[in-house]
Image: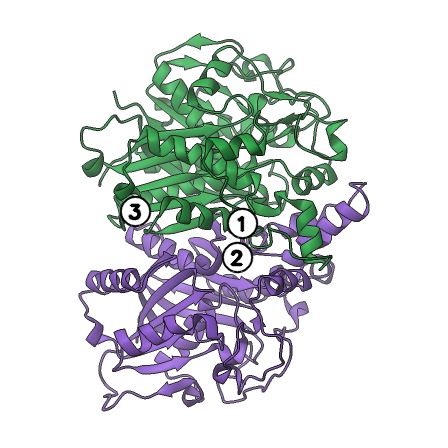
Amino acid sequence: MYITDLKCISAQETYSDKFIKGELNEIKEVTYLALEPNYLEFIPKGLLRRMGKAVRMGIGTGLPLVKAHNNIDGIIIGTANGGLEDCIKFLNQIVEYDEGTLTPTNFVQSTPNAIAGQLALMGGNHSYNITYTNGGTSFENTLLDALLLFEENNAQKLLVGGLEEISDYNYNIDFLANKYKIELISTTDLLQSTSKGTICGEGSNMFILEKEAVNYYAQVLDVEQITYPTQEDLKVILTQLLERQGLKLEDISSVMLGYNGDENHKSWYDFVGNELLPNTTLYTFKQFVGDYRTVSSFAVWLSAHILNESISTKHHFIIREKNNSSTSEKKYHLIYNHFDGVRHGFILLSN
Amino acid sequence: MEKVYITGMGVISAIGNDVLSCYNALNSAQTGIGKANFFQSKYTKSLLFGEVQLENHQLISLTDSSYETGLTRTTLLAYKAFQDAIKDAKLSENDISSFKTGFISSSTVGGMSNTDELYADANLKGEPSEFVLSYGGGEHVLRMVKKYNIKGFTSTINTACSSSVNAIILGARLIKSGRLDRVIVGGTDSLAKYTVNGFNSLMILSDTFCQPFDEEGKGLNLGEGAGYLVLESERIAKDKHKIAEVLGYGNANDAYHPSATSPEANGPRLAMKKALENAEISEKKIDYINAHGTGTVNNDETELFAFKETFSTIPPFNSTKSYTGHTLAASGVIESIFSIISLNENKLFPSLNCEKPIGEEENSPIKVVSEKELNIVMSNSFGFGGNCSSVIFKKTT
């Protein structure tokens, strides 16, 4: 399947061309908050006011794609938490008003499937519609579903996306679970950090995937995932993925890894990047957008621009260049990411 | 295309802690809805619930989980149903840990069933609770991956009240594609202040027994439970006992309103139409429908309209939510299991409390326990966000 269109909201200027044209923002904040576009161009004011951030970012990236591409055969969204801000707002009301009379807005907005549901509603789309909430591999789930729909001849064109919002509350909960750094650290220094934890980011990345395409950003070949693996398990599933595509480890020309400055979980990336795939060009991406459970959707967004050569800042993401790489060859590009060392996913792309 | 068979089932709901006790309750038209014994909320005085009749400590002991901390009721219900399903399918530890065995679950409330602990942790009130890692919708899946040593593909789905039907659908598709040989699919949800207050704020909870398909229905009763099915490919199932075949399925979106169904019933009609097409059968082949039938007049009218548009003669139908209450993400798989019980027992179970059928008498759901030769049955689930799914099962013997 082919990525033929895409939209991204992140802590960088990715909604416009600025980021891919070279404008990189240096951030030194506790969290890397998304730069949101002016939604009023396509979301009515009254509706926008009631939307939580996750819903708004999802609509902001998804709706322009749904409107620009007719005949979408399915809407597939991955989000570990959906509208958590609304969720906890509602929860706070329950506790603070002792289960009194509450308004339903926060409740309805808080369900993770509200984003795919709103996209269907606003886009007038009655097709296949699903939401995956499988933590760190929610986005990988969406890609597998899309691959299956195309294989089954049940779709020609799909909207697929991954998103997550930062709310004070999910930040608090993950902070209590020691997932984030205590010290302030900038985008430039994040990956060199030797302390534990990472920086929390947020964003929404949406894609039009088509079964057949002449003009496209990148081809998505396959996806694999595993939970609580050993290094040996990880090697087994990567080999399975490559075998399905008739490829070997040596055929991979570049790899994009989810290094996030967390000393605790770095060894997984070292294993894949240095031991399994030592002769590859190595990219990283979280230094610019932070980490969140569906951040592999940002990795796909960035990789699509890299493979399409539509990004002028490619060198900012390269930490190791493959020797004698030819420019004309077919390139196989592997994304490997995990959240907290628990759920791990591989996504194989090609130019 | 490879056929997909059900080789194991496990269920826990207000009408029983296993498949057999649920069957007995259905067969004697005994509802499980009533006053809550364990669930704590201001609304336990005024509302009725479909509560599982086991306390957490009993679930812990039934599932050998006393060594774990931070276990939510959502996870405990899942453990119990999952354990029964894998036992029923006689799966070995190696079978479960095969890279070709997947696990697809679903939940809406997840670990938010621990509303008060979540409130404290999210607002940084005091020391982190033991549940701090347990709130996410997919957290019960992590627990189960660890407990049962699952190595293959895993997924968690949240399409609100249609979640676990979508888990069944994805599982069947993964087997048909050849990616998996076997997949355990289902869902779990426990009673929670979060959902009770949410549904209450939408004013769709009934203060009496829910009356699906009654024109004076006052709303739904919330319930809790879990259900899992073991799906196996024809090749792997070989001469194993096959409980039923997953014959077809459909998923569509109503695209009408975030929390109500459209009068044209676009979502429900499309879901059933797609399921029939996918099963490659005529509508005349459906012998029974386990309806979504929440007991809210809006839902029931829409579903009834969808039946009229889809079927030349509406097959016998019921809503087993009149026994269990609405178990949200778990409802699809629980009702699939009840449909399969009907299929294999050749029995139709009554829908409870429908006194004045919507519109006319011929719109009445099943009224008494009756015997009928059943070959193919359908189960519907529709949810918030317009998510509608329908699944069709076929007898194997």
Q: Position of residue A196 (x, y in %)?
A: 52, 74
Which mark is in front, 3 or 2? 3
Instruction: Say which residue appears at 37% left-offset and 32% top-offset.
Output: B85
**Residues indicated by labels 2 and 1 sit on the same polypeptide chain:** no
Q: Helix, strand or loop at disc 3? A: helix
User: Can I make out residue B349 in this image?
Assistant: no
Residue topped by disc 2: A80
Q: What's the distance in space between the residues labelled 2 and 1, CA to CA?
A: 7 Å
Residue under mark 2: which chain is it in? Answer: A
Which mark is in front, 1 or 3? 3
Please identify the quadrant where the N terminus of chain B is shown. top left
Q: Which mark is residue A331?
A: none
Q: Helix, strand or loop at disc 2? A: loop
Residue sticking out furthest to the front: B67
Q: Which mark is residue B137?
A: 1
Q: Give the mark nearest the N terminus, 1 or 3.
A: 3
User: Dot 1: within a 10 Å radius of its alpha carbon, few (fewer than 14), some, or many (20 or more) residues?
Assistant: many
